[in-house]
Image (cartoon, rainbow, N blue to C red):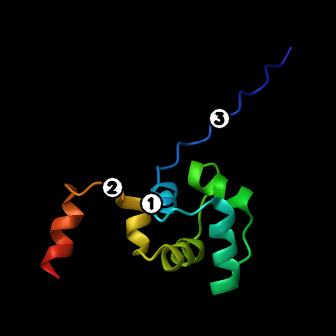
């Protein structure tokens, strides 16, 4: 009897700080989705945003840039910098500007 192939586990996605920045700006998923639609005409549902935040769905560069505009941060901040970490190296870089 032939053996069934085991499905390969999904590769782990790198964590992002999208949810942390959204909460830092005191926005709900619904408010963020509304702002994306009104300000940038980007149609994305709360469910899609939630899956992106949890790393279940990959984000595109366009979505990352749209989120960064609405959240008032650089796109790189959403993937590399937690908003409440004042001791992070990025704070030092920001002060050099």
Q: Nearer the viewer, mark 3 or mark 1?
A: 1
3D distance between C-alphas at marks 3 and 1: 36 Å
State which quadrant residue 2 falls in: top right
Question: In this picture, is 21 found above or below 55?
Answer: below
Q: Estimate the x, y position of residue 62 in percent, counting from the top left.
A: 58, 77
Q: Is residue 60 left or right of residue 90?
A: right
Give the residue number, with chain letter if any, for mark 1.
24
Mark closer to the chain start, 1 or 2:
1
Q: Which mark is residue 79?
A: none
Q: Which mark is residue 84?
A: 2
Label 1, secondary structure: give it: helix
- Dot 1: few (<14), some (14–19), or many (≥20) neighbours within 10 Å? few
Q: Is residue 17 left or right of residue 3?
A: left
Residue drawn 72% across the image and 69% down it: 44
Question: In this picture, is 92 found above or below 51?
Answer: below
Disc 1 + disc 2, Cβ < 8 Å: yes
Quadrant position of the C terminus in the picture: bottom left
Label 3, secondary structure: give it: loop
Q: Is residue 82 visible?
A: yes
3D distance between C-alphas at marks 1 and 2: 8 Å
Q: Estimate the x, y position of residue 54 in percent, counting from the top left.
A: 58, 48
Q: Estimate the x, y position of residue 74 in percent, counting from the top left.
A: 39, 75
Looking at the image, which is closer to me, 38 or 66?
38
Residue reaching furthest top? 1
Quadrant position of the N terminus in the picture: top right
Q: Which mark is residue 8?
A: 3
Label 2, secondary structure: give it: loop
Q: Is residue 33 left or right of residue 59?
A: right
């Amino acid at each position: 009897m032939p053996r069934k192939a085991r499905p390969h586990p999904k590769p782990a996605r790198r964590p992002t700080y999208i949810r942390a920045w959204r909460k830092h700006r005191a926005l709900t998923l619904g408010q963020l989705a509304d702002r994306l639609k009104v300000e940038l005409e980007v149609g994305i549902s709360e469910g899609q945003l939630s899956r992106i935040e949890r790393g279940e769905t990959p984000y595109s560069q366009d979505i990352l840039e749209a989120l960064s505009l609405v959240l008032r941060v650089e796109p790189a901040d959403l993937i590399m910098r937690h908003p409440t970490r004042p001791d992070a190296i990025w704070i030092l870089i920001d002060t050099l500007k």
